[in-house]
């Protein structure tokens, strides 16, 4: 089977949190933390592990190019991981 995926990098103003805490859980982590987890053998889905190799580039694309910068004011990547 062939799968097609779409990756969206967004920037937000203000805090982002899960509202349905009785149904979902998650958090934001920095690019460095994602890379550290991958290097230590953390279990990522295939598409996630493929993105990690280019994550530095993806989140550094200027807003004038994409309309989004891809990280919050603390430098955390706006993506979910498990």
Image: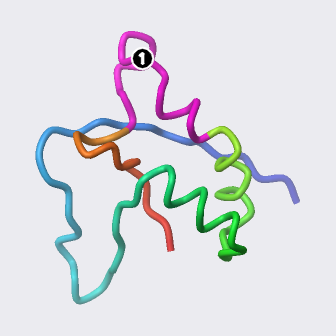
Percent x, y for residue 48? 64, 58
- Decide if residue 65 is on the left or right side of residue 71: right
- Decide if residue 41 is on the left or right side of residue 10: right
Q: Residue furthest right?
A: 1
Whether 50 is drawn above or below 12: the answer is below
- Decide if residue 13 is on the left or right side of residue 7: left
Q: Quadrant of the N terminus?
A: bottom right
Percent x, y for residue 24? 33, 80
Q: Residue furthest bottom?
A: 22
The residue labelled by disc 1 is: 62
Percent x, y for residue 15? 14, 53
Which residue shows up at 36% across the image and 18% down it? 63
Q: Residue furthest top?
A: 64
Q: Which residues are magenta?
A: 55-70
Residue 34 colored in magenta in the image = no
Which residue shows up at 47% across the image and 34% down it? 59
Secondary structure category for the residue under label 1: loop
Which residue shows up at 72% across the image and 74% down it? 41
Question: Which is the main secondary structure of the residues drawn in magenta?
Answer: helix
Q: Quadrant of residue 42?
A: bottom right
Whether 75 is drawn above or below 44: the answer is above
Q: Quadrant of residue 23?
A: bottom left
């Amino acid at each position: 089977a062939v799968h097609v995926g779409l990756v969206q990098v967004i920037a937000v103003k203000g805090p982002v949190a899960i509202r349905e805490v009785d149904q979902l859980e998650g958090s934001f982590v920095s690019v460095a933390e994602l890379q550290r987890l991958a290097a230590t053998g953390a279990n990522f889905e295939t598409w996630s592990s493929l993105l990690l190799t280019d994550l530095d580039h993806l989140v550094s694309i200027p807003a004038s190019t994409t309309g989004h910068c891809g990280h919050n004011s603390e430098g955390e990547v706006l993506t979910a991981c498990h």
